[in-house]
Amino acid sequence: MSAFPRIQIHFVMQQSVKALPATCNNIQVYLQGAANESYVDKLSVYKKRNMSNERPVVLIFRDDFDRVANWVLTYPDRETGGQMFGLWTHDRKPYINIIIGPGQNCSHGTHSFHQDIDYLKHVGTFLNTEFMMCHIGEWHSHHRLRLRQPSSGDLNSIWKHFPAGVEHFLLIIATIEDDHVRLNPWLFTASTHTYDAIEVKIMQKDNVFMRDDIVSNRISEGAEKTMLPQPRNTSQALNGKSVEQQNEGRWFLTDRGAYIVQFLNSKLEKIIDQSSSIEKTFTQGGLTFSFRRKTCRVAITFPQDFPNSAVKIVCNTPGAAGPLEWTIGHTEHISVEIVDPIVQSIKDVVPTVRT
């Protein structure tokens, strides 16, 4: 038997929200499916009411964090993700009741995650109609690259498809750092078109909703069946709770290497085409950044034995006789000083390319 009362709400699809009551109201929310096609599903949102200037804090139950950490550690080199359901408090704080993970027909990529839409509809409809829970946000991992902030692709997707009449949206990015899983929450505000890092706190108690057999069974139906690793060590940290994970000796998983990756990513985002995004892939222990600048598809590859070997840069242009290739010399130590020469060489070479 369920420990919670059931509340029936009639779903109504509508193009925009003209007036939202104090409780949830149903509107269209943009989602992205496994086939990388846009999809509009009916889920719930909550409109801002008398928000204060206090910095928001998102609270997460202890067992919810453990589940998110396990999902992240299952895909240490690929993205995974899910959705969050709950409410917005009167002072602009997101209150998470339920966090779900990937559905069985989702798609994991090195730089993208696409949820199983049927699974999301299955769970989201149940939580909204039975408990009036709102779809308040989404989470996904940036795995081991320590990219704590939303990527250019994240920003483009959220702002382009921000539902009309909605004031806030919560995005949590999970990263694996120093053998731990870190949660990085961001609050998007429609009226000011801004997004801000907010705090996260892990409550030292488990989620009471997940003790309900009907709720837990419904969430399990259609969920991805994955053998999840068990947390080996947990501790309270500024960002929340942590879960241990091995780094396999890759240079970009060290403190200095992770900083270089994040610094290079921020520099590249200033020179890529607006319609492009930065993709990161792992190849035999190496790391490749790919993006488009002008007519050129650029690939920057850090070899497995970097910094002992040079960084290779390739520019492929449609109609050209062949790709342009050049290298940035190796150094004795992993140093942030390699970032500017990489970026400057691309700015110097790519404008000269002709089709």
Image (spheres, rainbow, N blue to C red):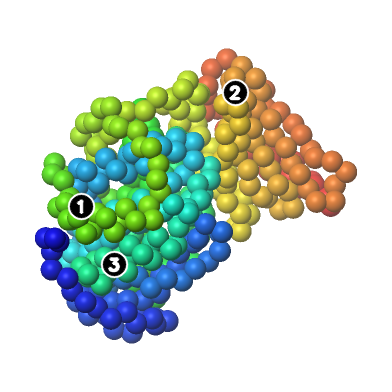
The residue to which callout 3 is attached is 126
Q: How crowded is mark 2: few (under 14 residues within 10 Å), some or many (20 or more)?
A: some
Image height check: is 293 above or below 37? above
Q: Which residue appears farthest toward the right when viewing the image?
A: 321
Q: How crowded is mark 1: few (under 14 residues within 10 Å), some or many (20 or more)?
A: some
The residue to which callout 2 is attached is 304
Q: Position of residue 294 (x, y in %)?
A: 71, 53
Circle 3/circle 2 CB separation < 8 Å = no
| Amino acid type of the residue tagged 1 in the rendering | Met
**Disc 1 versus disc 3: distance between alpha carbons?**
14 Å
**Disc 1 versus disc 2: distance between alpha carbons?**
43 Å
Mark 3 or 2 closer to N-term? 3
Image height check: is 164 above or below 344? below
| Amino acid type of the residue tagged 3 in the rendering | Phe
Residue 210 has which mark? 1
Nearer mark to the viewer, of 3 and 2: 3
